[in-house]
Amino acid sequence: MAVRPRDDRDGAHGDDSGPYGAPGGGDSRRSGRDAGQEQRQERRHERVRSADVIAEGVRGAQPVEIPGRLCTVAVKLLPVIGASVSLRSDGIPVQLSASSDQAAHLCEVQATLGDGPCMYAAATGAPVLASDLTAGRDVRRWPVFAQQATAAGVQAVYSVPLGNDAVCVGTLDLYRATPGELTLRELRTAQLVASVMTVALMALPRGEENGDGGEEPWLSGLATDHDEVYQAIGMIMVQLGVASEEALARLRAHAFAHNRTALEVARDVVLHRKRFDRD
């Protein structure tokens, strides 16, 4: 996990800088103010450019299409090959959408393992930047996920929480083909996309606010597949006489042992093709 995003302004000072970071110490404060103004103006321009791309990406979209559209926008704006968005729900990331089958698969891998950058970002409410899944501390931290990710053609994963300082409702996960850190500019862009995603999710209509009740909230149906996971957990609880946490652990362990996702095994349980027996 990257401790600090790479600043794309690192190394900007030349060798002729004075003792206060600018030639001729007397002008250092004014030069510093000018540089600070330029940086703030640059950040504003970056934000406007990114906002324009986001606005264009979601223009004309139905509410149900917004998570997928924003995943596509993230891939356009950032040096990544895929993106997925998931909600945090009872210890299982519930996938809402993804930009590709590869991104969807890696989201499901984390849900199956119960481990990975998105799980930690959801738990801490802070960005998790696993910049190199081929070597070093990211591999030591998530050895199984790192192996699965690199086998799928991904060597770095960045997970940005959705929500605010008080609550994390899910994560935006970004997948990169090669190792590398995000610059500060790129991290700000990722956080902007995550902020728009959060606003879209938090602004969902409630069923009781729909007047005649004829229209369902647009979130319903996005995560329908994972209803099967919760149903399977309930069935495993009955079959084994265990609590929900143990049932989920058994489901994940079986999926991992058979190189399948938790969702695939859950479907077999619900369809009575798989039964968990007491040891």
Image (tube, grey):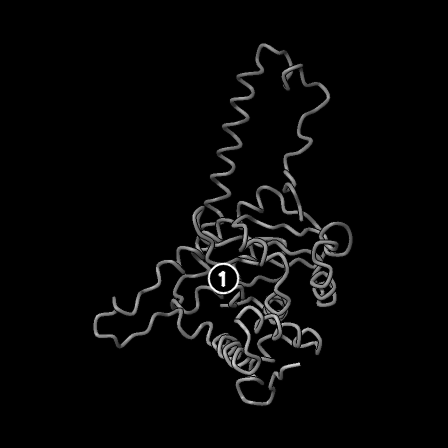
Which residue lies at the image location 53% right of the left edge and 58% below the top edge?
Answer: 172
User: Hey, which quadrant is residue 29 in on the image?
Assistant: top right
| Three-letter code for the amino acid on which mark 1 is drawn | Arg
Q: Is residue 261 above or below residue 79?
A: below
Q: Is residue 197 above or below residue 126?
A: below
Please rate how many residues cluster around mark 1, counting C-alpha atoms within 10 Å: few if below 14, some from 14 to 19, many from 20: some
Report the side of 221 relative to 124 (left or right): left
Which residue lies at the image location 52% right of the left edge and 36% below the top edge?
Answer: 42
Q: Is residue 205 above or below residue 122?
A: below
In this view, the residue in front, 279 or 211, is 279
Identify the residue at the far right of this view: 135
Which residue lies at the image location 51% right of the left edge and 22% below the top edge?
Answer: 33
In this view, the residue in front, 275 or 13, is 275
User: Hey, which quadrant is residue 271 in on the image?
Assistant: bottom right
| SS at circle 1 | strand
Q: Position of residue 199 (x, y in %)?
A: 39, 55
Identify the residue at the far top of this view: 26
In this view, the residue in front, 78 or 123, is 123
Q: Position of residue 229 (x, y in %)?
A: 52, 76
Number of callouts in the render?
1
Q: Is residue 14 above or below residue 262?
A: above
Report the side of 11 relative to 207 (left or right): right
In this view, the residue in front, 114 or 191, is 114
Which residue lies at the image location 44% right of the left edge and 68% below the top edge?
Answer: 65
Q: Position of residue 125 (x, y in %)?
A: 52, 50
Residue with the mark numbered 1: 88
Q: Position of residue 80 (x, y in %)?
A: 63, 57
Report the side of 226 relative to 275 (left or right): left
User: Hey, which quadrant is residue 108 in on the image?
Assistant: bottom right
Q: Quadrant of the C terminus?
A: bottom right
